[in-house]
Amino acid sequence: MAATAIRTEGLTKRYGNVAALDHLDLEVAPGEVVGYLGPNGAGKTTTIRLLLGLINPTGGRGEIFGLDCQRQPVEAHRHLAFVPGEANLWPSLTGAETLHLLGRVQGHVDEAYRDKLVARFDLDPAKKVRAYSKGNRQKVILIAALMTRADLLVLDEPTSGLDPLMEQAFRQSIREARDRGQTVFLSSHILSEVEALCDRVGILREGKLVEIGTLAQMRHLSALTVEATFTGPVPDLSRVPGVSSVQVNGRVVRCHVRGPVAPLLKVLANADVTHLVSREPSLEELFLAQYGTDGQDRDARHAAR
Amino acid sequence: MLHAETAARAQGRVRKSPGAVVARLTARKAARSGVIWGYIFGIAIASSAISYTRIYKTQAQREALAAAYGSNKATGALFGPAPQLQTVAGFTVFKISMTLMILGAVWGLLTSTRLLRGEEDSGRWELLLAGQTTRKGAAIQALGGLGAGAFALWALTALITALTGLDSQVGIAAGPALYLALAMVATAVMFLAAGALTSQLAATRRQAAAYAAWFLGVSYAVRMIADAGVGLHALVWVSPLGWVEELRPLTAPQPLALLPIAVFTAGLAAVAVRLAGARDVGASIAADRATSRPHLRLLAGPTGLAIRLVRSAVVSWWAAIAVSGLLFGFIARSAGGTLSGASVQQVLSKLGAPGSGADAVLGVCFLLLAALVAFAAAGQVTAARSEESGGRLDHLLGRPVARSRWLGGRLLVAVAVLLAGSVVAGAFAWLGAASQHAGVSFPTLVEAGVNIVPPAITILGIGALALGVWPRGTSIVVYTLLGWSLLVVIIGGIGAVSHWILDTSVFHQMASAPAVSPHWAANGAMVAIGLAGALIGGIAFHRRDLRGE
């Protein structure tokens, strides 16, 4: 399938004066695994519901494999499988009945793979949905999506409620999907999961896509963390070009460096450095850099209101 | 200073809040609907009383009415005994008591199962139990809250009845008015308790409501047999509806009958509290199999799923229709035997039963069956909406399923359910009538059965319209239309209501077959309104966002 898996142009959804999604321009190539990050209310689920045609955009448009999400939803859905954020299923059906129903509705099921997934996720399909825990209901909708071998997997917080063992089973299944050339659009709060699985990551903030790229690209654009330990006097690093967030703790200095590191190295070369560590930011640090390091920013904003 | 005030307020809240959170939440919800239904109850009583004074002005007219109904055991079986029909008080009790008793019971069982088992199903009950209460304590509080709802229902009913009684022509004193309101609300109280008990027994809210509804059906059937004049009147003391009947408001008050009502209510409430304390949250007393062999035959698409989901409820509902039809057919001949003569027919016509003999009785009976069928139509629409609001529809519409296919399938299933129910009604009414040699043919009664479908299709179509344009108001629209239509037809049968108002009732448009021939043109118009509503609603549903609760 040659067409772009997901393409949006100025996709916007407003609820009154609130922009749940604001002019989203996004392209996901076939075979890519793209992570979609953002805190609660950032617009992740809104994006997915717009792509599925469950809600209508206020502006812009979206396509799935070249098919318009609003005008051709049924045709578009033939190419995708969807895991919603809430595992609300029919309580009176069993797991097996639910998988059968959703498979028949989708139109294609790899039955051997379904059985493998049922074993991998340790699901008892004879149980009624009302008897399942939240995690087991989540397993049902995950298996229902994965068993279709759809060209595109659209996953909205797919591992909420899963234990660490099942989280590993999920990661294995996504790697298998990627190896088969399936495209995965993964909305998640679990940064380690996105870091482990995704080729590219998009970060959403208040309805706007503020960053998108590979982790390497995002790290390149972000600050390097440098920690130096001195035996003699600690030099003043705060005026070194590119250096910020300087923290001095005795003879240990920690700072961030953005851009070329040569100016910092020149200063350090003239000082008595006994220990030097530099590392790239993790996805968590990149994410928190967009939203503040902890709740302090939000607290400050609330206090200012 | 500020700290001191804040602390004092906080302490005040702490003293006031934790022990009664569940009671207050339940009371707020129950009282809200109690007020609405109290208003409806009060208006129904007031309209009946005032209309009687305006229509039956002479003593001769009143005596004719009493002659038609006063000694008729079969109409007594349907609507309860009819003593003192020559008085405003006697007529009012006869005209509205059975309807209000049943409406009250339905309100009671739906309210308590919604606020007990429904809250538990949704997971909100666990949040409340995490507060400063226990499972048993929360159940006691919830029952207290339901009591507040019942009080709201009684208070408004009593107020309107007492105010109506001030009219010199009506002339009902305050004491008897309050007693009448108490009698009308008594079934609601008993079925609040019954719903509380079935909420402990059943695994889901729907199942709990079904258990309580079956109990109501059995209560009605036992009371019916007791009042059928076949020498089994003692059975009236076996049925909760019979106890309320024995209160005999406005005619020959018998407050002693409050005793079984109070004991029964207290007993059910006590058992419900005990079971709530003994069982795990989310579990049920009745065995609920956690596992099952897969039954895949219907699960091939959204329409098959719709059939699978409504299957058990529909079978129960068809059974209720069949039993009702059988009983109605069974009493039609003896009920119709005393209904003859021009003046009596005139009176009957005003009561919404044109014609004579068994046909006239069956005409009224099929109106009751039409209400049952219309309730099923309303239930089908609200079930469709709950698929959307509960998020389950996302699983279908996020796959290659067109919205029109899903909604169209559900509406077709609903129409098929209604049509089959109507044929069941006609066939079983014929079976009952034929067993008594009532002389009403099978085709006539099947035709009368089909005749009750168009009002239900109108409700279905208007419900689909609401689903399309005002999804969160779907339930309000269908049940308001249904309640209004019933109220208008109950009051309007007396003849004192403007035809503009009468025309707003879907049941008023329906001919009282088999007493008269079905009005196929009017039926066609109702079906057309239903189709138009479904079409516009379908288009609106296709264009709008899916919306949760």
Image (cartoon, rainbow, N blue to C red):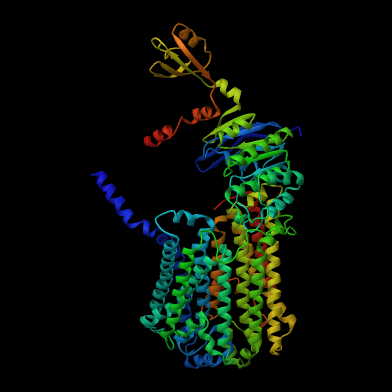
Q: Residue at x 56, y 87 (%)?
A: B226
Total labels: the figure holds: 0
**Residue B424: image location, x then y, percent:** 70, 75
Q: Is residue A241 visible?
A: no
Q: Residue furthest left?
A: B1
The quarter of the picture where residue B171 lies is: bottom left
Q: B186 or B100: nearer the eye?
A: B186
> Residue at image x 40%, y 35%?
A299
Q: Is A240 placed left or right of A204 in the picture?
A: left
Residue B18 appears left or right of B350 = left
Q: Nearer the viewer, residue B3 or A113?
A: A113
Picture quadrant where residue B141 is located:
bottom left
- From the top left corner, tell me how far across and down residue A276 is, in percent: 49, 15
Residue A74 at x, y percent in the picture:
71, 46
Residue at 46% x, 63% y is B277
Is residue A281 rendered to the left or right of residue B297?
A: left
In the rendered image, the residue lying farthest to the top is A270
Tell me, yes or no, if residue A134 can be seen here: yes
Q: With respect to residue B133, does A283 lie above or below?
A: above
Quadrant (top left, top right, bottom left, bottom right) of the N terminus of chain A: top right
> Is residue A259 depicted above or below B185 in this figure?
above
**Where is A199 relative to B204, above or below?**
above
Quarter placement of the C terminus of chain A? top left
Q: Position of residue A209 (x, y in %)?
A: 56, 32
Residue name at image x 50 percent, y 29 percent = A290
